[in-house]
Amino acid sequence: MRLSNLFFTTLRDDPAEAEMPSHRLLLRAGYVRQLGSGIYSLLPLGFRVNKRVEQIIREEMDRIGCQEMEMPVVHPADVWRASGRYDAIGPELGRFKDRNGRDMVLAMTHEEVVGLLLADIVRSYRQLPMMVYHFQTKWRDEPRARGGLIRVREFVMKDAYSIDRDEAGLDASYWAQHGAYVRIFERLGLDTIAVSSDVGMMGGSQAHEFMVLNPAGEDVLVLCEACGYAANRQIAIVPKPDSVPEAALPLEEVATPGTTTIASLAAFLGVGADRTAKAAFFMTGDGRLVTAIVRGDYDVNETKLVNAIQATGGMRPATIEEIKAAGMEPGYGSPIGAHDTLVVVDDLVARSANLVAGANREGFHYRNVNHGRDFTADIVTDLTNAQAGDRCPNCGEPVTLRNGIEVGNIFKLGTKYSDAAGATYLGEDGVAHKIVMGSYGIGVGRNVACIVEAHHDDKGIVWPAEVAPYAAHLVSIGSARDPKVDEAAERIHAFSIASGREILWERHRDC
RNA sequence: CGGGGAGUAGCGUAGCCUGGUAACGCACGUGCUUUGGGAGCACGAGAUCGCGGGUUCGAGUCCCGCCUCCCCGACCA
C-alpha cells in the first residue's frame, strides 16, 4: 500500500474527548473515527488490525474444532420472549418494529438463535459434542460508552457456543475454550488473568472472565498473590471479621444532626464505622423496594444483592420519594419501623450487636440496634464488597484489589436456552435428553484497544508483529536523483504483496 | 438517570465577562527555495460560531428552550 493513497489522516494534537492512551493514539494515528457516542468507524488501518486479531481468534477456535458460521443481527422479538430475556433485559436491548409492526430486536448475543438451530439440527447423541462460533456485530445500548474502543455500543464480538450431551461434556468444552483463550491472548500480546465471575444476564452455573489489568478498567478484581486466587469483586466472598459477642443493650434514640454519611455519623458519636449499620435503597425492575443493610465500614455489593433477591428487569437506586413511602428517611434510614420493603441484611450485621442505625427521623439515629430484636431480615446473606487487605478465602493471606478490563469471557450456560427452544437429542438409551450449552465471547475492538494500552510509548503505538496492520513501513528517499531508488522500492513493495504480508510504502518524491 | 465539563475551519484553541458580522497554531493548496533525519519563506482556500427562539439598530458574545459529546457515578456480557 502506498501511504499517499491510504484512506486516513493523522492528527497533530490530541482530540479533546480522548483520555485513554488507546483512544488518543487510535484517533491520532488514523485507525478509527467516532460517529456517535460509543459508535466508531474502523478506517483501513484499524480494520486491518481488527482482521488480524480476528484471524488469530479464528485460528485458535478452529484448532479446538469450533466451526465458524454466521447468524443474523436482527431477530424477531418472539425469539427473545421465548427465553424470557425480552422482558428480563432493560433498555440496553435494542428494540424496534418492522414495517408490519412486528417487534424486532437488535441482537446483543446469540444464545437464542443457537438454541433454535439446535432444535432444528441436533437429533442424536452421535452428533455431539459440537462447537460453533461467529464474528458478528452486536448492539448494546449501554448507559454510558467510554474510553474510546473500550466500552462501545456497537461492536464486533466473537461468540462461540458449545453443544454437549451433559455436564461432563460441557466441562470439557469449557476448558477447551479456556485453553484457546490463553493461546489467543498470548498471541495478541495481552497479559490476562482469568477470574471467576458472575453469570449475569447469561444465566448459568460457572463463568470466568479474562481480564487485563488497567487502572481505567471497569471491573475490580480480588487477587491473592500468595495462592493465585482471582475473582471479580462482584462475586468474591472473603472472610469477614468475627463479631465481638456482647449482650444486647436497650435501644436508645440519639440526636445526630447533619450526619447523613457514615463518616460524619461515626465522628459525631465518636465510634468506629464498624459500630454502625449502613442502609442502601434500591428499586427492582419488578417494582420491589429493597433495603440493603451492611456494616458501616463496608459497601453494598449490588451483584450479590441482585442475585440474592432474584431481581428481574434489573435494579436501580431508589428515589427519595420511594424511600419515604416505605416509612424510611434517607440519610437516617434503617428497616426499623419500615414497611413494604424487602430487607436484605449482610451476615456480619446479623451477628453484630449494638450497632448505630438510622431512626427514620431526620437528625436522629438509634444506638444498640440488634438484628432479630429491632428489625428482621427477609434475607441474610453475604452482601459486601471485598476490600483490600481482606483475607483470601483460599489461603488466608491478604488480598489486593486491581482494576481490570474484560477482554473475554466463558460461561457454562446449562440448558436454559436449549430448553427455551425445545432442543433435545436422543441418547443411547433411546430417550430425549436436554442439550447442555456454553457460551464464549471475545470483543474484537476492545482487544485492539487493550493491545494499544499495553503496547505504546511516548511516540505512539508499537504493535506486536502479529497484529500490525503492515509488516513494515518502507520510506524511499532520493528517487529524484537516482531512479534506482524507485525501482528497488517498487520491487520490495511488489514482493511484500506477493508474499501475503504487505508493507506500507511512503515515497518521498521530492528528494 | 445524578454530578461535573464542553460544543467557534479537518485537529487543538483564543474571542464571550465589558454586543459592532471571526483570530492563532498545526494540517491543507499554489509558487519559490531547500533537503542525510518528521523542511523554510510567500501567497491562498477553508467557519451559516451545535440547533431553535427571544432581546437589540446590531448577537459567537446577553436571555430561554433543545440537541450532541466527554469525564465521574449509577449501570453494564
Image (tube, rainbow, N blue to C red):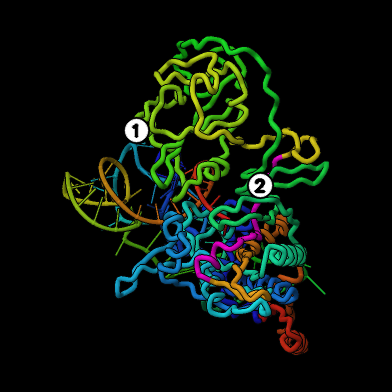
Residue at x 61%, y 44% (from the top left corner):
A234
Q: Nearer the viewer, residue A365 or A128?
A: A128
The quarter in which the N terminus of chain A is drawn is bottom right
Task: Determine the residue positioned at 63% across, 64% down.
Answer: A438
- Image spot of residue A315 (x, y percent): 46, 44
Q: Secondary structure at mark 2?
A: strand
Quarter of the image for residue A508 reads: bottom right
Q: Chain of mark 1?
A: A
Question: Any mark on residue A269, and which?
Answer: none
Judging from the image, mark 2 belongs to the subunit labelled A
Q: Are marks 2 and 1 on the same chain?
A: yes
**Rendered location of residue A471, percent (x, y):** 74, 76
Which amino acid lies under the numbered mark 2 shown in the image of this protein?
Asn
Q: Which residues are magenta?
A: A401-422
The residue singled out by tag 2 in the image is A232
Q: Tell me the crowding category of disc 2: few under 14, some 14 to 19, or many 20 or more residues within 10 angstroms, Cα based.
A: many
User: Residue, x 64% and y 53% (percent of image)?
Assistant: A405
Q: Which residue is identified by label 1?
A: A321
* Residue B65 to residue A161: above or below: above
Relative to A268, residue A423 above or below? below
To which quarter of the image does residue A208 belong?
A: bottom right
Q: Residue at x 58, y 31 (%)?
A: A346
Comparing A334 with A211, the one in front is A334
x, y (%) of residue A311?
48, 46
Say whether residue A60 is left or right of residue A156.
right
